[in-house]
Image (tube, helix red, strand yellow):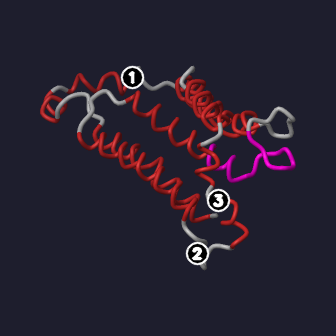
Amino acid sequence: PFFYIEFFSILYVSLPVIVFGFNDQDVCRYDSAHTPRLYTAGIRRIFYTHSGFMRWMAESVYVAALTVFLPPLCFGWGSALALSSTRSGDPDWSALSFTAMSTLTLTLNLRLAIEVHSWTVLELLSYSLMGCALLLSLVLFSFCPPQLWVPQGWWGPFNSAVLRIWSQPAFWLCLVLSISLSLAP
């Protein structure tokens, strides 16, 4: 499981953030070098404030709460009205984890994409790679046989999980709800 967590952190979330930070530039290099008054707003902390930082932190806790609590709510954890469940009435953890991973990845990158003011080929490439990597990893975890380095009990519930999850209305409800609710603040 630790490989998957590291893979998630490195590939899905950091690549668009790195590209965004690398290319985020309001003025060209020549203007920034010859116009020192452009730095006055940064020195006076006009755009960055502690209250703005606390708002960002509150938004991240809000998105984390949506990611944690919305999939079990949509899939009907312990409910007789579940849109998707196993024989015991509770959804399996592969459905919850795939749904949470998909919603978190798409939400984070969509929120970052809204912040991008000037799109270049590099931004388009990084977001396209993130989407392809998400789709590819979901399919690989769903259809590849268990590997020797991964315990069978951990890999087993993921077999054909994509076909099960994507055919259920609970997945699409959770995806639409979490993305739309996370864009609310």
The residue indicated by pointer 1 is 44
Question: Contact, CB < 8 Å: mark 2 with mark 1?
Answer: no
Q: Which residue occupies the foreground of this view, 57 or 38?
A: 57
Q: Which of marks 2 and 1 is nearer the N terminus?
A: 1
Q: Residue visible at 39% across and 44% down? A: 16
Helix, strand or loop under label 2: loop
Bounds of the magenta span?
A: 84-99
Q: How crowded is mark 2: few (under 14 residues within 10 Å), some or many (20 or more)?
A: few
Residue 139 within the magenta-colored segment of the rendering: no
> Are the two marked residues, 3 and 1, in contact with CB atoms closer than 8 angstroms?
no
Which three-letter amino acid code belongs to the residue tagged 2? Gln
Which of the two discs, 2 and 3, labels the residue nearer the N terminus? 2
Task: Choose the circle earlier in sequence order: 3 or 1.
Answer: 1
- The local secondary structure at tag 3 comes to helix
- The secondary structure type at the circle numbered 1 is loop
Residue shown at 61%/64% (left/top)? 2
In the rendered structure, find residue 177 and report the number of the disc placed on it: none
Report the residue that reaches farthest toward the bottom: 148
The answer to whether residue 118 is above or below residue 86 is above
Residue 153 is left or right of residue 18, and the answer is right
Task: Name which residue type carries label 1.
Answer: Arg
Disc 3/disc 1 C-alpha distance (Å): 52 Å
**Where in the figure is residue 121, as x and y percent of width and height?**
23, 41
Q: Mark 3 points at which residue?
A: 158
Measuring from the top left, give residue 120's x and y in whole percent: 24, 37
Where the N terminus falls, by quadrant? bottom right
Q: How far apart are marks 2 and 1 (CA)?
A: 55 Å
Q: Which amino acid, mark 3?
A: Phe
Name the one closer to the observer, 66 or 185: 66
User: Residue at 62% of width from left, 27% of height from top?
Assistant: 177
Q: Residue under circle 2?
A: 147
**Residue 172 pos. (x, y %):** 60, 34
